[in-house]
Amino acid sequence: MSFSDILLMRNELLLVAATVVILIADLVFAADQRKQFYYFSVFLIFIVAITGLFPSESGSIFGGMYETGGLQIMMKNILNFSTLIVLLQSWGWFSQVKQQKRIGEFMILLLSTLIGMGYMISSGHFLMFYLGLELATIPLAALAAYDYYKSKSAEAGIKLILLAAFSSGILLFGISLIYGITGTLYFGEAGQLINGSTLSVLGLVLIFTGLSFKVSLVPFHLWTADVYEGSPINVTSYLSVVSKGSAVFIMLIVLNTVFASLNDIWDTLIYTIIIITITIGNLFAIRQRNIKRFLAFSSIAQAGFIMLGVIDNSAFGVATVVYFILVYMFSNLAAFGVASAISAETGKESIDDYKGFYGTNPRLSLVMMLAMFSLAGIPPVAGFFGKFFLFTAAAEKGYYILVLIAVLNTIISLYYYLLVIKVMFIEKSDSPIQFFSSNLPMKISLVICVLGLVITGFTSGVFDYMVAVSDQLFSSI
Amino acid sequence: MYNLNILLLVPILTLAGIMFVKDARNARVVAAIGMSVQLVLVFVLLYMYLAERNAGNMEEVLFYQDITWYESLKISYTIGVDGIAVGLIVLTGIVIFAGVFASWLMKDLVKEFFFWLILLATGVFGFFISLDLFIMFVFFELAVIPMYLLIGIWGTGPKEYSAMKLTLMLMGASAILLVGILGIYFNSAPDGGAMTFNIIEISKVNIPIAAQRFFFPMVFIGFGVISALFPFHTWSPDGHASAPTAVSMLHAGVLMKLGGYGVLKVAIYLLPEAAGEMATFFLIFVAIGVIYGALSAVMQRDLKYINAYSSVSHVGLILFGLLMLTKTALDGAVLQMISHGLITALFFALIGMIYGRTHTRMVNEMRGLMKVMPFLSVAYVIAGLASLGLPGLSGFVAELAIFVGAFSHPEPFYRVITVIAVSSIVVAAVYILRVVAKMLMEGVKDESYNDLTDARWHEKLSVISLLLFIAAIGLAPLWLSDMIMSSLEPIIMRLN
């Protein structure tokens, strides 16, 4: 293996390097230099994220276990930048006395999951896939339980680890069936050898189920609300954007390479799952008053929408999914950013506490409004374009009834997103949250999100590029 | 050569101006300047359009521009106008101009109010100039969503309920419309060419009849709901009653016409065969809406509810004329869009001004307003007469054309349903004249009314600008009618 081959793993290698440097830096920076340490770590991750934007070779190493190309790099870039934004939004929480000492641990755990996701997305082999997945999951449980002295946070950690173990078990069972049928663990070879036998369908269903837990599709969503509510708010936003996004990405790759020939079967499967996921996610979101639970159910519904693009097994469909996740990252992180700014400042996490917020904090309210409009899919915010392309993808396959059900569900979702806007802009309160100024990293992160929300839709180049790179998944077969 | 982008640029600059003014009170000045410039530009457009046509330019649309946006989906920023769009753009220009002056005394959150109001108008202008289904849809939603905040924050009465109901029903309709648009897109190349969202391109192909049958109801209902299609009209009375003055004006005056325009340019133009087959079915609902709206207006005591229901009835006539699918009726429908837009905007402006003085909208609580505020009262009488179709005012021309066109159908079904719809005019006379008699005539009942003032300069400006065009269309309808007729040509050709 030559040096240039190793460079194909640029993203992961840099992340490992960053992790090591942060580990050492944690010891170097003194206890009263936590802020500098925080900025240093964020800067390192910023460097890694920026490096990802430079062009990179595509190819495979380790005998095809690790594959990379334009599509994978695009996915990893989205995850890297999401992580960066999450960290920028975390300073308010880090600066609390209890957390100050533990910034280093948090960063390292977070980066480990990101490395795991990188390997998972780039895997061309079930073993690599499984290793990546576990590396991406187990530290997450530690992160969810980060506020271990709060019983809810501890509960979230336990729930997450138990469910991760359970879903991994199912996934492994599926993988072993596929190995039993085809005698190989490589995605490409397995894809060619899979026939429509009952056993292979069982393998498909089990692997799909295992991944559905990560994406939190109904009926595998039951952990979501509790874990999201119990975890610290920045871990919640990481779970809902980065962790979910990476699971969707690998699902796209596995379905379209390994199970390409069973397309008819997973089409029907996803068709049903979309309808129940969107509907149940929406109906439960209406009743939520805690902003984290609210966003949890909204993210379940959004996962259902994402599947509309997965169902269209073409380069266009893949591109719509990747594009939607990019847009979803901006919108969800903007919403979580505002929520966590409020939470860090006042400790309030109920939507009812936001009454009269526009009167005292107009800018944060406007960011929240843009985020809600984007999640609901209202033009000209980016979320509209994301949703529109997903609908187009499903309509391309001729599933007009499915699209109709989905668009009618967007109206239900519009209702509860408007409720948040109503609370902030229309309702009055005797004791609204007082004006506060958010810290600098939070401001930067919100500016990035708002710019992303406003600009992404109008720059068609992003989407057209995604369509071009997504072709790689289908041309290799 | 006229660049249509300027019709978007001026509102956007106005929005930016409003955002950056320091003193919130100056927001109205910025809005007024912006919309005055826009009004001038709109008339320049009208003049240029007529000049081009007189010079013998027989293109289907003028001032056409086509910029590719999303290469992979063949979405382009395609704009251009025909006579129908020009007429409606002129209407929008006048109504938003009048609306800004009608809300001159707005007190709470002035900057935000004008921001959302102008944003709404931007959406409407964009909708009328777009020729690409995708951007048309974008502008359509852009025009609807500010309504939520405009009614929710600045409205009166059960504003939160009305705002939510209106937004959800209209967005629900646009959701159904979205499926229809996707359906048209994926069937826009039956012979295997490239699919397109461009209306002009799609009008050159024949979409398979099975697809037309499937998607016509979606597009028709999607656009119909915003034109208060029975039984989906329930958002309209509540929404109009709760909305602040300028928003009612814009909504009843212009936004409800988006539906009619969309039905004509998308549903009928692109799916003509299905339109022919299903017109009778939808006509029944439209006719019910026309009569039901008129009868409901008779039963109301609140001025805004009276006008909201009267709008349901009159906008119903637009859909009625469109579904007749004859040239005269289509012409009448488009005239009705413009005429009703002006009349209803005038009504809502006057109601807002009267309410601002008497603090009640209940007809039976007011007496003898003619004596204390003669200007507003006379304007109200003129609006009323125009609304019930007095010759010499715009309402007459439009309704006459609709009914003549409708009655010229030889089949008994069309004749019967026309007779039923015509009877709504009689009912209109009842609810309009009753209000005029009760509210404006007789002696002043409440002593305190003697201290009320008549219209101030900005209110007069708003009212006169609307009155002027109502009279202009009523007295000289032919140039407008001709402009519309020539643009209906391609649609009529598709229908045959």
Image (cartoon, rainbow, N blue to C red):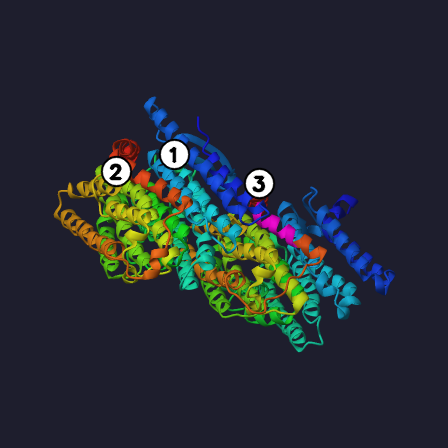
Q: Horizontal and vertical percent for residue A126? A: 64, 59
Q: Amino acid at mark 3?
A: Gly
Q: Is residue B240 visible?
A: no
**What residue is shown with label 3?**
A461
Q: Nearer the viewer, residue B267 or B453?
A: B453
Residue A448, percent from left and from top = 65, 50
Q: CA distance from mark 1 to mark 2?
A: 24 Å
3D distance between C-alphas at marks 3 and 1: 28 Å
- What type of secondary structure mainly makes up the magenta span? helix
Quarter occupied by residue A128? bottom right
Q: Quadrant of the C terminus of chain B?
A: top left
Q: Quadrant of residue B133?
A: top left
**Residue A449, magenta (yes or no):** yes
At label 2, the amino acid type is: Gly
Task: Tell me the element at label 3.
Answer: helix
Q: Nearer the viewer, mark 3 or mark 1?
A: 1
Q: Is residue A438 visible?
A: yes
Please give the residue where the numbered disc 2 appears in the rendered image. Answer: B474
Instruction: Chain letter for mark 2, please.
Output: B
Local secondary structure at mark 2? helix
Q: Amino acid at mark 1?
A: Val
Query: Can you identify the residue that label 1 sits on?
Result: B81
* Mark-to-mark CA distance, 3 and 2: 50 Å
Q: Residue furthest bottom?
A: A151
What residue is drawn where x is 70% and y is 72%? A147
